[in-house]
Image (spheres, grey):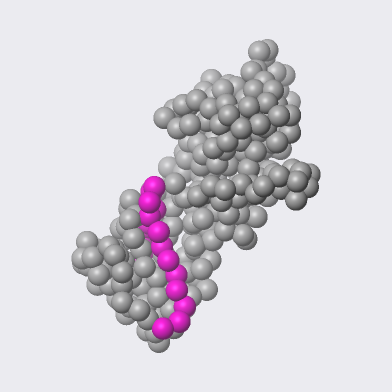
């Protein structure tokens, strides 16, 4: 599933292509035709994201709310208009024909008003990519919880935008086992995790991929082959089950955690066995 950096990058691409322009909206597939007609030939104000949710605002405080889910794609194309290919639920086209965007396979695509948008946002935790994010709100949930930190980081009502890759990688980078209870973390540990997520996800927006290894562990520095995976990016533990840890050489382990595979190094991320003092 696309993580928060993907939606933030997509919002920027939509803004660059359409913000302030009159847009034609259609549904070649037909499933969004009635709603598309309501914003057809109106101004697209801007696009914004919060976690894994995308909001495209049109004049009159109307928003197309998109969640890509597991297989959704929203392709923004500049240049000559071409016929839609495949099951395109939503097509946005600049009135001057200079750009178009096609949405396919999304879990959610709804036209909503400002009140409904506020309801959606009220259910989401702070997003590390947003300048208005308040990490104290995240700490209040994590620092009191008996749930595992691996579970809490993936809970969108606690922290919006973090998915399986960033969860696995940020915990490795801070030597924290994914099954450690949230309440045992010190505030300083949480602050370091939050700051790292901000930096890593911001870089993900810039590059369009997830890279989490430090300079000394890149393929060039270590003399190893680049990672080959359909998710792309250089990582420490995500989807590296059985492969040697890039830091200590111990085979990476995995097991299911709340329905998703969790990855960690048993040496770099030892099991937590005593109650930590909190700041």
> What residue is drawn where x is 67% and y is 20%?
270
- Name the residue furthest bottom: 96
> What residue is drawn where x is 67% and y is 47%?
225
**In this view of the protein, which residue sits in the foreground, 84 or 16?**
84
Q: Is residue 50 left or right of residue 248?
A: left
Residue 77, given in percent of the width and then of the height, sits at 45, 74
Residue 250, given in percent of the width and then of the height, sits at 68, 26
The kind of secondary structure the magenta stretch mainly shows is strand
Magenta-drawn stretch contains 178 = no
Q: Quadrant of the C terminus?
A: top right
Residue 88, given in percent of the width and then of the height, sits at 30, 65
> What residue is drawn where x is 41% and y is 62%?
74
Q: Quadrant of residue 28?
A: bottom left
The stretch of residues the image draws in magenta is: 62-80
Q: Is residue 60 left or right of residue 4?
A: left
Q: Quadrant of residue 184?
A: top right
> What residue is drawn where x is 39% and y is 47%?
70
- Name the residue furthest top: 274
Residue 182, given in percent of the width and then of the height, sits at 59, 25
**In this view of the protein, which residue sits in the foreground, 247 or 271?**
247
Asked if residue 241 shows in the view, the reply is yes
**In this view of the protein, which residue sits in the foreground, 190 or 80?**
80
Asked if residue 140 shows in the view, the reply is no
Q: Quadrant of residue 84?
A: bottom left
**Numbered-mark total:** 0
Magenta-drawn stretch contains 78 = yes
């Amino acid at each position: 599933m696309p993580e928060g950096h993907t939606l933030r990058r997509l919002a920027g691409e939509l803004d660059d292509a359409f913000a302030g322009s009159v847009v034609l909206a259609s549904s070649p597939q037909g499933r969004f035709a009635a709603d598309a007609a309501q914003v057809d030939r109106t101004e697209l104000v801007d696009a914004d994201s919060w976690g894994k949710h995308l909001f495209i605002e049109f004049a009159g405080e109307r928003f197309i709310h998109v969640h890509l889910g597991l297989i959704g794609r929203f392709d923004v194309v500049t240049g000559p208009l071409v016929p839609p290919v495949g099951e395109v639920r939503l097509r946005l086209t600049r009135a001057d024909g200079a750009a178009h965007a096609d949405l396919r396979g999304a879990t959610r695509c709804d036209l909503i008003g400002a009140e409904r948008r506020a309801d959606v946002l009220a259910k989401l935790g702070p997003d590390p990519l947003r300048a208005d994010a308040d990490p104290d709100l995240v700490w209040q949930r994590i620092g009191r919880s008996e749930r595992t930190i691996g579970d809490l980081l993936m809970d969108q009502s606690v922290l919006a935008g973090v998915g399986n890759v960033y969860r696995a990688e940020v915990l490795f980078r801070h030597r924290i086992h994914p099954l450690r209870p949230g309440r045992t973390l010190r505030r300083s540990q949480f602050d370091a995790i939050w700051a790292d997520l901000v930096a890593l996800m911001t870089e993900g927006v810039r590059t369009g991929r997830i890279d989490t290894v430090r300079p000394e562990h890149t393929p060039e520095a270590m003399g190893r082959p680049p990672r080959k995976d359909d998710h792309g990016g250089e990582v420490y533990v995500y989807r590296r089950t059985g492969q040697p840890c890039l830091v200590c050489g111990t085979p990476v382990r995995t097991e299911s955690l709340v329905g998703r595979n969790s990855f960690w190094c048993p040496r770099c991320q030892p099991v937590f066995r005593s109650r930590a003092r909190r700041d």
